[in-house]
Image (spheres, rainbow, N blue to C red):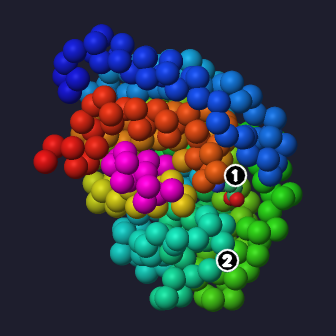
Amino acid sequence: LVIPCWPIFTEKIKNIYLMCKEVRDGQCAQYIPQLARGDPEKFGVSICTVDGQKASWGDSKIPFCVQSVSKAFNYAIAASELGANFVHDYVGQEPSGRFFNEICLDPNGKPHNPMVNSGAIVVTSMIQPKLDTADRFEHVLTEYRKIAGGEYVGFNNATFLSERSSADRNHAIAYFLKENKCFPEGVASLTETLDFYFQLCSLEATCETMSVMAATLANGGVCPMTGERCIAPGACRDVLSLMYSCGMYDASGQFSFSVGLPAKSGVSGIMIVVVPNVMGIALWSPPLDKMGNSSRGVAFSKELVKQFNFHNYDCL
Ligand code: GLN
């Protein structure tokens, strides 16, 4: 067993959960009603180890939208299917140092990385571009369910419709990308690409789901619950590298400094944290800090590395 003393370990995690439940900072995302109406009291934590031990606390079975966490998995799927070289002909690996939805390109004329909107929109355009819209959506849903080992993955149509109708910035980004010839040959129209991007932001999951998905990343791309390889080994390494440097918006540098683990957050208040070769962690609580990351999720991560030597550079 990767964590031998499970009851002792989970007791400590439970105490961190109870401690962070008291955190009252932050505000739910306001840009669409589906998120603005989020309950600030909700807090769920799930963990799943690379050998399939699982535990959850709080609101771990309540569905939420994966939002920007989809960027990590969409990239992993694209890189698995197309190879990292192809993907990175169109998107870089550098933190942008700018807001996640800024209209800008790197010095090579590419989106900075797959974790900002511009990069994520380009990556989304690459996934199975020959299939029609319904089959493309189904394909990605099937891949998510594999990575989640059969845990719940759904779709929230209200969020999708809201995202689509408040998407001026994402349309501006998409036109800017098109103007600068950032898309590969033969991809769908901008409207179809954006719809697909919003649909993937609007996929629904629970903490239990996301902990298994994170555990698949912790396990090199093989789902610990099913033993199925879902993400190519190279793509798994690459997505973890990008999560480490770019996964937490403009707090990515602070997070890798203080927590030292690859993570990805989304505006719904979800955060996944990966302890490579050990476990995946899902933290969900809607109030966000000033950088757009879940306040309780960040507090939990900091307390976790205080109590355990999970920081990448703890074991020196
Ligand atoms: N769906 C929103 C957008 O693309 C926000 C994504 C996120 O979690 N930051 O703008």
Q: Which residue is mark 1?
A: 199
- Percent across and percent down for residue 253 are 43, 60
Left or right: residue 220 versus residue 201 is left
- Percent across and percent down for residue 260 are 33, 49
Total number of numbered discs in the rendering: 2
Residue drawn at 44 percent across, 55 percent down: 254
Cβ(mark 1) to ligand 1 < 8 Å? no
- Percent across and percent down for residue 22 are 58, 23
Callout 2, which amino acid? Answer: Ile
169 relative to 240, above or below: below
Residue drawn at 43 percent across, 51 percent down: 255
Left or right: residue 61 versus residue 47 is right
7 relative to 73, above or below: above
Q: Is residue 255 magenta?
A: yes
Q: Is residue 206 magenta?
A: no
Q: Earlier in the sequence, mark 2 or mark 1?
A: 2
Q: Alpha-carbon distance for marks 2 and 1? A: 21 Å
Does residue 43 appear anywhere in the picture?
A: yes
Q: Which residues are magenta?
A: 251-264
Along the line of sight, which residue is nearer the eye, 246 or 136?
246
Residue drawn at 67 percent across, 40 percent down: 26
Q: Quadrant of the N terminus?
A: top left
Secondary structure under tag 2 reads loop
Q: Which residue is mark 2?
A: 103
Along the line of sight, which residue is nearer the eye, 230 or 215?
215
Along the line of sight, which residue is nearer the eye, 234 or 113?
113
Q: Quadrant of ligand 1?
A: bottom right
The residue furthest top is 7
Does residue 135 appear anywhere in the picture?
A: no
